[in-house]
Image: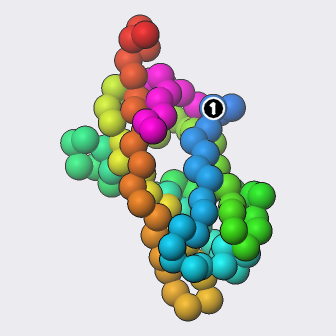
Amino acid sequence: MTVFVYAGAVAPQAYALDITPGDSGVDLSTVSAASFKVRSAAGVESTWTVAITNQTATTLTLTHTLVAGDADSATTLAVYATLTIPSGTVRTATKLLMVKGKFEP
């Protein structure tokens, strides 16, 4: 499912991603840090800070509150999360965040 925001979106708007371990067997209660890696359609890469909430062994929610510069113009952003666990770092599957122009439906 593609999520969308409008160009220029800032707080209190946020991008949230619910994480489950899938077939990986990762105990999500051991995640000590996380971030979103973001790439625009033009190839510009950035890292977004996230808050970790609702953390259990089988689920957690990562939320990034949008700031100026995150979604300034219409584009499609590819986003994946990196999770720090005791054995290293793992990443999630890539999701799409569509940034629509201010007057798009």
In this view of the protein, which residue sits in the foreground, 36 or 22?
A: 22
Disc 1 secondary structure class: loop
Placement of the N terminus among the 4 image quadrants: top left
- The residue under label 1 is 13
In this view of the protein, which residue sits in the foreground, 54 or 8?
A: 54
Badge 1 density bin: few <14, some 14–19, many ≥20, Cα 10 Å: few
Residue found 34% across the figure and 26% down from its top: 74
- Is 21 on the left or on the right of 38, as rendered? right
Which amino acid type corresponds to the residue marked 1 in the rendered image? Gln
- Is 6 on the left or on the right of 27, as rendered? left
Q: Residue furthest bottom?
A: 87
Q: Residue furthest left?
A: 42
Q: Residue furthest front?
A: 23
Placement of the C terminus among the 4 image quadrants: top left
Principal SS element in the magenta part?
loop
Q: Position of residue 99 (x, y in %)?
A: 40, 29
- Is 54 on the left or on the right of 16, as rendered? right
Q: Is residue 71 visible?
A: no
- Quarter assignment of residue 87: bottom right
Residue found 59% across the figure and 79% down from its top: 26
Q: Position of residue 67 (x, y in %)?
A: 56, 38
Residue found 69% across the figure and 63% down from its top: 59
In this view of the protein, which residue sits in the foreground, 29 or 11?
A: 29
Q: How many marks?
A: 1
Magenta stretch, residue numbers: 1-10
